[in-house]
Image (cartoon, rainbow, N blue to C red):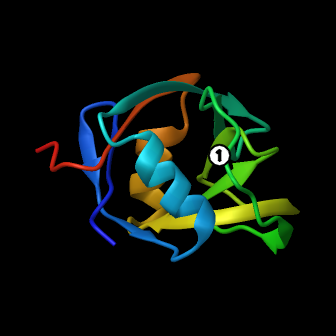
Amino acid sequence: MEDLYMKIDETVVHVTWEDNSSVRALFEYVKDGLQLTLHRYGGFEQVGNIGKNLTSNDKRLTTTAGDIVLYSSNQLVIFYGSNTWDYTKLGHINLTQTELNHLLNKNSVTIYLESQNIR
C-alpha cells in the first residue's frame, strides 16, 4: 500500500498504519487530501467527524498515546492518553508522550491527511 501522510497543525507526523480494510478505505477517501478539525474530548483524545462512513472492524481495545482509531465508522480519534472501548485501529503516531501532549493537548487541532507527500 502507498504511504498515507498526516499533518497535525503544522507538524508532519510519522504514522505506522495498520493493514486493514478501514485504512484502505481511508486511503481512497483522502486521495486528494482531507482537512479535519478535531476537538479535545475527555482530556486524553482528539475527535472529529471525517464526513463519511468507512468500513469498520471494531473490537475492544485499550488504546495508548499515539493510537489513531475509527469510532462509530465516521469519527477519527487520536489519543494522547489511554481509553478502553470498541474501536477499529487505524495506526499509531511514532512520537513520545511529551511530543504528543504538546501537539494534541489543546482545545482543537487541524489534521490534514493525504496520499501524497505533504512536506
Q: Residue at point 67% right, 44% down? A: 45
User: x and y percent of residue 70 in the render?
Assistant: 69, 52
Horizontally, residue 77 falls left or right of residue 14, namely right
Horizontally, residue 1 falls left or right of residue 82, namely left
Image quarter hosting the N terminus: bottom left
Q: 1 above or below 110? A: below
User: x and y percent of residue 118 in the render?
Assistant: 16, 42
Of the residues shown, which amino acid type is indicated by label 1? Val
Which SS class for mark 1? Answer: strand
Q: Residues within 10 Å of mark 1 (few under 14, many from 20)?
A: many
Horizontally, residue 74 falls left or right of residue 46, namely right
Q: 88 above or below 31? A: below
Using the image as rendered, state which of residue 66 and residue 31 is in the foreground: 31
User: x and y percent of residue 11 in the render?
Assistant: 25, 41
Q: From where the camera sits, is residue 3 visible?
A: yes
Which residue is farthest left? 119
Q: Residue at point 66% right, 66% down? A: 89
Q: 31 above or below 93? A: above
Q: Which residue is mark 1?
A: 77
Q: From where the camera sits, is residue 84 visible?
A: no
